[in-house]
Amino acid sequence: MTAAIPAWAETAVALLLVSSGIFVVISAVGFVRLSDFFLRMHPPSLAYTFGSWCVTLAASIYFSATESRAVLHPWLIPVTLAMTVPVTTLLLARVALFRRRSAGAADTPPPLGPRPGS
Amino acid sequence: MSTLLPLAIVFTLGCYGFASALVLVRLMRGPRAQDRVFALDLLYLHALLVMLVLGIAHHSDVYFEAALLIALFSFVSSSALAKFILRGEVIE
């Protein structure tokens, strides 16, 4: 916190950081309070998208303003998250569906497509 | 230099800490294993965001590489755990 930074950039970075913190808290509250696993999968996407985008934009603005050049490498983080998080989420959804099906829950949808045996 | 940015950094880190405590509640209480895996994945994300904010706070580029590594490790560990729950093995 020693580098000189213009006032507008400091304000923008502070606002983006605070909004990212608020998004992350909202997603965590939703993750704890919702009742079902499939409902619970939705709030974390708020943190995965808006939370990480706001912090990345803040870091990009901060380093660009203090080093007087365009600093774009923080955007690698949202790109990495956008590639990896859907895979993890889809795998976990399939895990939940498979375990509910094998536990014999009544309201589980049947598998798509023809059964291999029939 | 004003105190706006340090205040915002402290507030953001506090928000992340509070959110991590809430997610830890779900990790302890989660009724099924997939809830716990998802909570672990979310904790990885919070660690990543903390790393980025610390990079701004200390004006250092090293934290960015740590954040990228955390993103990759979160993908590997969560997908391996999900595969293990689904099939009983990670690599068949």
Image (cartoon, rainbow, N blue to C red):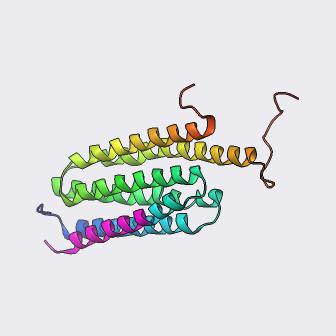
Could you say which is closer to the camera, residue B72 or residue B92?
Answer: B92
Number of numbered discs on residues? 0
Residue farthest along the right direction in this orientation: A118
Among the 4 quarters of the image, the one containing residue A30: bottom right
Q: Is residue A86 left or right of residue B47?
A: right
Q: Is residue A71 visible?
A: no
Q: Which residue appears at 45% of the width and 40% of the height?
A: B77
Q: Which residue appears at 27% of the width and 47% of the height?
A: B64
Is the N terminus of chain A in the top left, top right, bottom left or bottom right quadrant?
bottom left
On the image, the x and y values in percent for residue B38 come to 52, 52
On the image, the x and y values in percent for residue B91 come to 54, 27
On the image, the x and y values in percent for residue A109 come to 79, 49
Identify whether A1 is placed above or below A99: below
Among the 4 quarters of the image, the one containing residue A10: bottom left
Magenta stretch: dominant secondary structure: helix
Is the C terminus of chain A in the top left, top right, bottom left or bottom right quadrant?
top right
Q: Is residue B59 left or right of residue A17?
A: left
Could you say which is closer to the camera, residue A47 or residue A78?
Answer: A47
Range drawn in magenta: B1-21
Q: Which residue appears at 56% of the width and 37% of the height?
A: B84
Residue farthest along the top direction in this orientation: B92
Could you say which is closer to the camera, residue B44 or residue A74?
Answer: B44
Q: Which residue appears at 59% of the width and 46% of the height?
A: A92
Q: Is residue B30 visible?
A: yes
Identify whether A57 is placed above or below A112: below
Q: Is residue A35 left or right of residue A107?
A: left
Instruction: Assess whether residue B9 is covered by the magenta stretch.
Output: yes
On the image, the x and y values in percent for residue A116 come to 81, 28
